[in-house]
Amino acid sequence: MPQFVDTSPPGQCIFCRLVAGEIPAARVYEDALTIAFMDLGQVNPGHVLVATRRHAANLLEITPEEAAAVMQTAQRVAQAVKAVFDPPGLTLLQANGREGDQTVFHFHLHVVPRHEDDGIALSWPRKDPPASVLQDHAARLRGALPGAV
Ligand SMILES: [Zn+2]
């Protein structure tokens, strides 16, 4: 994960300043709700960040409309990345909170072209809990999701 951490207050964060045009950026796409640009911390050619135009710290603070718009922009960017760089793989990465490896606290999603042996690592330590534990977790989440079946 990148080591850079932006500790600017809301409204003055590095992505808000980028949206406002106060700092230069390699812009890729913009619409009413989103902006896509290239990060200096690019990990593979064609690595693009998609952020909300409005400052919101994380997934829990964006609106459903912003969530949909970010994914639509990510898909459009992914299609362009495929057309231009033709990577054999592509990973979307969206981090929330320091413990979730978020480093800039303005909602964004990474569109990362992937290649075999490109050095990007995501550890996935399976815990394999008993089925009864999964059923309990699912029941608790259903209780917190109005309209869930
Ligand atoms: Zn911001």
Image (spheres, rainbow, N blue to C red):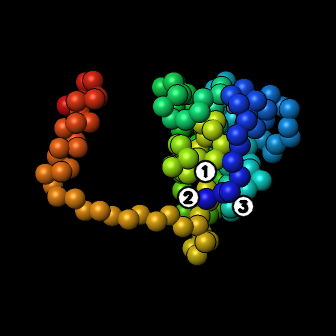
* The one of 86 and 73 positioned closer to us in this rendering: 73
Q: Where in the figure is residue 9, as x and y percent of width and height? A: 71, 30
At label 2, the amino acid type is Leu
Q: Is residue 51 visible?
A: yes
Q: Which mark is residue 45?
A: 3
The crowd level at tag 2 (other Cα within 10 Å; few <14, some 14-19, many 20+) is: some
Residue shown at 70% from the left, 40% from the top: 7
Q: Quadrant of ligand 1?
A: top right
The crowd level at tag 3 (other Cα within 10 Å; few <14, some 14-19, many 20+) is: some
* The one of 114 and 9 positioned closer to us in this rendering: 9
Number of on-image labels:
3
Q: Which mark is residue 25?
A: none
Residue shown at 48% from the left, 25% from the top: 64
Element on which disc 1 rests: strand
Relative placement, left or right, of 103 versus 94 is right
Q: Which residue is mark 1?
A: 111
Give the vertical position of 36 relative to 20 (above or below). Answer: below
Q: Are marks 1 and 2 in contact (CB under 8 Å)?
A: yes
